[in-house]
Image: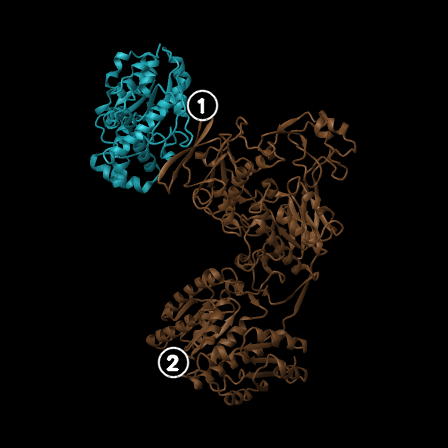
Chain colours: A brown, B cyan
Amino acid sequence: MENLKIGVFLSDCGKALIEILDFDNLTSFLKEIPEVTVVERGTEFWKGSGLQTIIRTIKEQKANRLIVAESLPKLSEIKIVEAAEASGLNQNFVQVIDLKNHCAWPHRNVPLEATEKAKAMLLAAIDRAKILEPIHKLEFPAVKSVLVIGGGISGMQAAEDLADLGFEVHLVEKAPFLGGIAARAGRFFPTDDCAACIQSPASDVKTITHTSRKCIYRSGIAAIQGLKIHTNCQVVGVDGQAGNYKIILEKKPRYINETKCISCNLCAEVCPVEVPDEYNVNLMNRKAIYTITPNIYPPTYVIDEKACKFNECKKCVQVCPTNAIELNQKPETTTLNVGAIIVATGFKEYDPSVIKEYHYGEYPDVITNLELARLLDPFGPTQGKIVRPSDRKFARRIVFVQCVGSRDKRWNDYCSSICCMISLKHAIMIKTSFPEVDVSICYIDIRTTGREHEEYYEKARELGVKFIKGRPTEISHDPESNLLIVDVEDSILRRLLELEADLVVLATAMVPSEDTETLAEIMQIETDEDGFFKEYNAKLRPTETKKRGIFLCGGSTFPKDAPSSSLQAHSAALKAVKFLNTGKIVKDQKTAVVNEEYCGDCEFCPVSCPYDAIELVNVDEKHVVAKVSDLLCEGCGICVGTCPLNAIDLRHFKQSELLSQTRAILSIKGQDKPLILAFCCSECGGASVDSAGMTMSDYPTNVRTVKVPCTGYLRIEHVLAAIRYGAQGVMVVGCMSEGCHHEDGVKKVETRINVARALLKEYGIEPERVELFNTIFVEGDKFAEAARTMIERLEKLGPIRFSKEV
Amino acid sequence: MTSYALFLGCTIPARLPNYEISARKALSKLDISLVDLEGTTCCAPPPVQSLDLETSLAIAAYNICLSEEANLDIITLCSGCFESLTVANETLKQNEKLKAKVNQILVKAGKEFKGSIEVKHYLQVLSEDVGKEKIKSSITRKLCDLKVASFSGCHLLRPSKVLKFDDPERPHVYDELIEALGAKSIWYRNKQKCCGGLLRGYADDVALAIAREKIINASKAGADCIVTICPFCYLTLDLGQVLMKSTYQEEHNLPILHYSELLSLTIGVDPKELALEFHKIKIDSVLNKIE
């Protein structure tokens, strides 16, 4: 091994620190340490001539470990590490510490003490530098192919985006035709434009300009190079990992050869089997061989397996002019290899038949909004006329009931967010075409939060739609008059009303699509308490999952209107591109590593890992050891804190590094107050320590900080070690309980702290010497105050008196 | 012949002899033998439950103990008794802690709750033990186009998870029992809504207004009578019509019958034995529709 040569670069931050820290003193202190070969002083080292000094030092081989004291944490660190790497030094050999925010500014009123603390901080970095090991870059191949599950509005748009950018895309739709729930809905609010309309692919340059939008069947979606559409098809298996997923698809037989079919309708004409058409609210019959609506993709037919008589009949086979009907088709399984998956499985209407007081399913004239949409569709069973299904008479009085199964603790707590607008859309459509129809909407709150949504509400009122504030208690049916009676208390009039109606329309809750749970299990991704897929972070990563390479869009995460679904589709597509664009995934090996000699036969780490990065591998028949995936591991170290056998360590932050830093930083005391060690995480908790400095919030210099990747990394021994090395108290500063950047690291450490406190008590040490604090960046003052309180508390307690050996 | 211990409660023996006699006659004609329990007390209805649960359970359990000693299942006529005894019986059967507490109280009266019997409403006995077919075959007098507004009240159905009598939102058992007699159970507005009875004594005017709405809805739908189960529904609607006369200056004259009366009349009990004179609203128009 080459000789250890540590170069230390002290920035006075544009002379901002020279009034506080005694740089001459620091320099002479450093020069006495034998491993330190270079000590440089400057005003800034993260750019300009300062950075050149660092580069020169590396190139001239004057130093092979760097410690740079800079402010502007993170940005300066990125720049310095980049330059060092480019000059041939391993990234892990560079440490950037922040003497400004962690020392000079919070202690600006006590310069002598601050200088002593700065020495301790430098010493900690030097001791750590002595045992650092290089971290290498890893590369994983990524297949430039994407699977999009769900052929509704968001799935189609994401698929188009990706195919237009040259990716191979497999768009899988469970139903025989594309379109999803939007196609059934007919029209969109508040623009009233057609639901069959999608963006036109950029690749279709012959007929379409980049701004145009077209019906699905005119859009050219099927002609896009690289886009393969699999209808009547389901994902049944997902294996492999990010960048390289193996997908198993099962194609249900359509019994029609899509490429041969010319949609001449001769088959449906001769088909002798008629069944109720569920797509059209059972208000008309369809044949066993059928298509749903003329503007659909693929422009072909499908055979209803349950209704068709197959070989007993074969009339369609005889009449088909292109021999497109293949009655012997069997389910087919295909395997795909993709780099990423976009889940766009959408939502569905809640089945309101469980809400017995509304008698859906029992009274034919109680229907749902989607069923009404079929009635309103000119391609629908009534050509757009509104009838009551029971006797097909024109419906003159229509009552909408909002929040059916939503905002109701018995069924679904949440607001489905789009149902108010759907009912408004339908009410407006009805009132516009048939002004004589009486339309009432019973609501709890009308929620019109999007652009032009309130105007839509206004329009409905102007058209004479009545709004009744109240949730109906019951819908009953008068068999004599065949009328429905809706009992509702108008809470504004404070009157009980009995509304007579020909048709009652239930604005039902929107819930996850049927297969959400199964798919979540197949893909090993999370769902939320309402059963929707759970995004990684609602604010900043709304279309990503915790599992790398799997993205979400549209209604799969929550009910959404078309504009939001569309927006998410483009976002998910972009995230997939970002992920696969270079054809490889490059990352630093800042990962956990298992000492197989110690590891064995427990399940703590795979369960505690927030990233599913650890699996158990058999070493022989009876014994297993943990194996960490370098691709999936995010280097948080929660496994380190969890392992009961201390068999895991982090490559980029070994426990020995933590301990040597702890010992060194406590070795210089500086003043006569009790020493405190604050372990802080590298996210919100650590940021609050930064911001205490930035806001110049005073706290005593005897509070010394050591950063860990996540507080979940900490083991009880680490806390005890701090005390052994001279700390009179230990603070653990992590993120807010619900805001941990590694899911629940801070919750896990809370439990451990409680155990540590109990242990200390056993040794006769007051448990209140150890405490967890949850802070966020802006709470620098909170950290400072906590530090002051802690010191006061320790002063009252007096020095630790060991009754037993720790 | 199946035997049951008859639990009468308070209102029926005190105010509704026509209910008691018709139930006794009808059930005995349908081979259900009734054994009178000695020394029964108040059933501890829901208002008592809300005052002190343990006390109310102990009172109800005392009555159940009497029946356990006789080794008979309980049959009730009153829906309130059905609710309170069933709630007590089921709660104590499932909750060992409460059972122990209640038994500590009962021991002072020399009783112990064991949980060995069931509590049934007489409609349950009719639908489950006797059966619609037997009722149909016992009919000796035909109803001529009798349109009945059926009204089951609250405590026959609710709390549904404990009582398990019928679907509380879409009840059908009671209507089927009415149709088994050859009557037509008609639909009328707000059929399942409250009779108003439990508001009496607290807000008489509101109670009466609710009852009036029920009478009007049933009349509008062309009902010849309302047939009730619960003693309080009966009182509210029958006696209520007398009060409507003075309060609203309205005469509805809509006969209110206990189901047991209609049952007795169709299976051949002599009307003279049924104390029909106790009806405040005369039921002659109904009697005229019986062959």
- State which quadrant residue A468 falls in: top left
Where is residue A181, by image quadrant?
A: top right
Q: Is residue A487 above or below residue A178?
A: above
- Secondary structure found at label 1: loop
Q: Is residue A169 visible?
A: yes
> Residue A728 placed where, x, y %?
40, 75
Observer-nearest of A179 and A13: A179
In depth, the one of A722 and A256 nearer the eye is A256
Along the viewing direction, whichever of A381 and A709 lies nearer the viewer: A381
Residue A806 in view in this figure: no
Does A646 appear above or below A534?
A: below
Q: Residue B59 location in percent, x, y?
A: 24, 35
Q: Which dot marks residue A480?
A: 1
Tell which subunit mark 2 falls on: A
- Tag 2: amino acid: Lys
Chain bearing mark 1: A
The image shows residue A361 at horizontal and vertical percentages of: 50, 32
Q: Mark 2 points at which residue?
A: A673
Q: Is residue A772 above or below residue A68?
A: above
Left or right placement of residue A720 versus residue A332 in this view: left
Position of residue A543 measured from the top left corner of the image (x, y, whole percent): 58, 55
Image quadrant in which the C terminus of chain A is located: bottom left
